[in-house]
Amino acid sequence: MTIEFIEIYSDIGAGKHGTTHGVAMLSEHCETHYPSAPVHKIYAKHDKLAPAHPSAKYIENLLPFFKETLVPQVGECLQQMDGQSFPIIISGDHSNAIGNLAAFMNHHRDQRVGVVWIDAHADLHSALTTPSGNMHGMPLATALRLDNADCQINTLDETATDYWHKLKSLSSHGGILPSDVFFLGLRSFEPPEVHLIKTHQMFAYSAKGTPIAGGDRQSLDTILDAMIDKLAELDAVYVSFDVDALDDTLIPATGTPEPDGYQADEVRRIFDRVLMLDNVKLFEITEFNPTLDDDSDKHRTIFGLLDHALALIHQRS
């Protein structure tokens, strides 16, 4: 299958800026391997003022960027490809998935949509529950439209409340079900996120195979077998790979590296099983921040994993 790249140069929603440099590095790398592949570049403008809403930092910048630029432009790209090419999103920080998921949901408006979230973090916080206010910890809460008010610790003013509800309404899709989100590699999360995972019995495993909702540790192959059986029920699957799913010894070049993560060969095994599925319709890589570490050997680990993913997708009929 032919490949098209969507590059998103925005790190507005991150606690540490610099992931746009990661997008540029990955873009340059891909250009040498797929020089004829179309590339769609999307840029965000960001003022340097202090965030207006501490519980949803820079939401006043992100909402117009997503609504006016990201969602319509990604949506247009998906419409143009529409099964003829496979979309690869190279994104800055993970808050961009708020807009990317909304565009994906719009494109598959009448279908059952699922998400494979390969990440150290659950990203299930809402503006009501976040301890940091960083928007890259909230994309799945917007797609699932979960405020998690039972675990509220923040009080929002009227403007922030309005912005938050508009973020959840970027897509006209009926919404992704909690049962249709699949977490791999989780090991850093807060009690409000665990509350949602346990309440909804979500499919969520650590990189060491421990189920977050409780139960016995499982092998990676057993986890993937169970996940693929469940994925078969879905019409369209969005696969998001946050590079911090890797162990922190392999990827210091990311905003929130965490110990006890995947080894590179484990991520390749996940890609081998997931990216060849017919209902997987998009692959995203995000949160690579080379400004935080200049170890070229470790950068090559990320390049190699992206190459592996692209080769698998390119083989698809």
Image: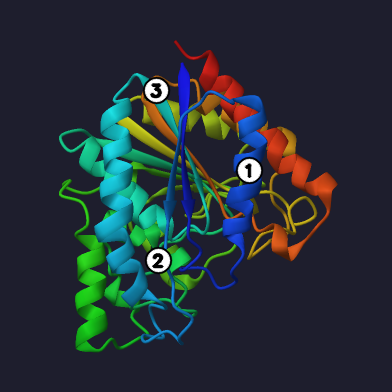
Which label was assigned to residue 26? Answer: 1
User: Which comes before the other along the chain, label 2 or label 3?
Assistant: 3
Q: Amino acid at mark 3?
A: Ser
In the image, 80 versus 237, the foreground residue is: 80
Instruction: Give coordinates of residue 74: x percent, y percent.
Output: 33, 44
Residue 263 seen anywhere in this rendered image of the structure: no
Residue shown at 42% from the left, 26% from the top: 86
Question: Are there few (<14), some (14-19), or many (20+) residues within 10 Å of tag 3?
Answer: some
Instruction: Give coordinates of residue 47: x percent, y percent.
Output: 44, 78
Which label was assigned to residue 210? Answer: none
Residue labelled with disc 2: 195
In the image, 48 versus 231, the foreground residue is: 48
Task: Give the SS element for disc 2.
Answer: helix
Q: Nearer the viewer, mark 2 or mark 3?
A: 3
Residue 203's place in the image compared with 55, above or below, is above
Residue shown at 63% from the left, 57% from the top: 21
Which label was assigned to residue 85? Answer: 3
Residue 111's place in the image compared with 199, above or below, is above
Q: Relative to 29, is 13 on the left or the right?
A: left
Q: Amino acid at mark 1?
A: Leu
Disc 1 to disc 2, C-alpha distance? 36 Å
